[in-house]
Image: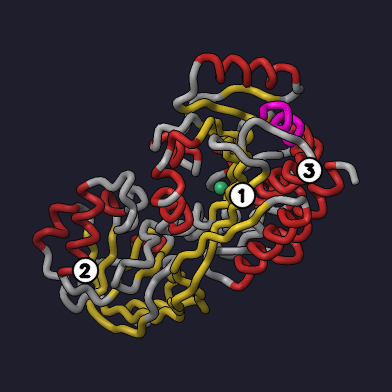
Amino acid sequence: MEIRKRIEQHLNVLCNEIGARPTGSKANQAAVEYVCEEFKRAGLNVLKQEFDCMDWSEGGGTLTIEGQDILTAPAPYSLPCNVQGELVCIHTLEELRITPISGKIVLLCDALAAEPLMPKSFIFWNPEEHKETIALLERGGAQAVLTVSLSPECFVPIIEDGDFEIPCAMVLPGILPLLSSGLSATLSLNTKRRPARAANVLATHGKGKHKICMSAHIDTKPATPGALDNASGVAVLLALAEELSDRELPYQIEFVLFNGEDYYSNPGEMAYLASYLSTPADYVCAFNIDGVGVKGQALAYSFYECSEKLINNLSKLAAEIEGFEQIDPWPQGDHTLFSFSGVPAISVTSSGIFDLVDSVLHSDRDSLELIDTEILESLVKFLLYSI
Ligand SMILES: [Zn+2]
């Protein structure tokens, strides 16, 4: 079967038959089983790297202030609650340091609601002010925390942390004029944290001491089909594995489907980092595929810790395939795992993907209609020529 047809089949299974596949969920396990079977069918050796995580679900929430209903939603991974207390609005870190919040429902606004606060377990980048804000809220004994959404129209969280021990909900900025300290608030959140297991999938082709890694993340945020983010990357790697069948190579090709790029604590990435990436000298280089195949957009590649020779060779190859362009390095995504470890890494995404981050990605709009499978086929060919 031609490459494009197989890519379409994989996309259909991942986005339409399975759908949203957040780490720890049943759907995530189904996606893992599917790719394991497909890699095996292509003749690869397959291994699952399992780890503990949390399966989180929610059934909405209600917020009443002085008897008036206010639109709200639980923050992702929040604890459940049913609490009543005095509202206290906190605008700055200085104010949080000196305000008694025990037994109160704390609303974070202005400077304290300007950017997402990093999860407690996130070690790569976690500013002191973020850590202090979280610690003050937990130690101060607040009953619940409300955060103002980063978007005026929909709920975009500031706190997204399964290790945060205070129930947390979001409100839209439009209701701020109605809220002030001293008002009486009631918050109820219908959520569930359940211990779960999930797994990265590792599939290898060939032998050899050194390896080229091909990675993409298999998980999604909840409630999104995750077409561009990142069923398209997974489908490209499955199609590539099928194309390798009898090819003999001087090194091993290791396919890694990370499970946790869109999960608050990146558990799959951390498991891989602690095991396989503890010997970075084994790697020739790593390609990470995320957000590829946007209709009408070029494929956008960038280099991290790569030698001049590798950059020149790959750039020449990319120039021969229509619709490839080089972009500046960007500091998020799974390619950084490799570059932080000193492994030469190449990220492939779509130019213009960064414009879709707030409007499309992580929402129900990230569906198959956005994808051009011809672009994905040309990426499979590029990767095939690269190795
Ligand atoms: Zn992604």
Going from N to C along the chain, the mark reached first, 1 or 3, is: 1
Does the numbered disc 3 mark a residue whose Cβ is under 8 Å from ligand 1?
A: no
Which of discs 2 and 1 lies nearer the camera? The answer is 1
| Image quarter of residue 218 | bottom right
| Relative image position of residue 208 (x, y in whole percent) | 59, 37
Disc ID at residue 53: none
Task: Say left or right for 213 vs 127.
Answer: right
Q: Element type at marker 1? A: helix
| Left-right relation of 254 to 148 | right
Determine contact: label 3, label 2, CB under 8 Å.
Answer: no
Query: Which class describes the residues within 10 Å of circle 3: few (<14), some (14-19), or many (20+)?
Result: some
Q: Residue at x 42, y 58 (%)?
A: 264
Q: CA distance from mark 1 to mark 3?
A: 27 Å
The scheme the figure's colours follow is secondary structure
Quick check: 336 above or below 6?
above
Name the residue nearer the viewer: 36 or 184. 36
- Numbered disc in front, either 3 or 2: 3
The residue identified by callout 1 is 229
Q: Percent x, y for residue 250?
A: 64, 30
Residue identified by numbered label 3: 245
Residue shown at 66%/68% (left/top)?
A: 30
Q: Is mark 1 within 8 Å of ligand 1?
A: yes
Mark 2 neighbour class, 10 Å CA radius: few under 14, some 14 to 19, many 20 or more: some
Residue 1 falls inside the magenta stretch = no
Task: Name, please, the residue furthest toward the front.
Answer: 208
Tell me the element at label 3.
Answer: loop
Q: For numbered disc 2, what is the local secondary structure?
A: helix
Q: Which one is nearer the viewer's eye here, 254 or 136?
A: 254
Q: Name above or below for residue 224 compared with residue 58.
A: above
Magenta region, residue range: 379-387
Q: Residues within 10 Å of mark 1 (few under 14, many from 20)?
A: many
Which numbered disc covers residue 138?
Answer: 2
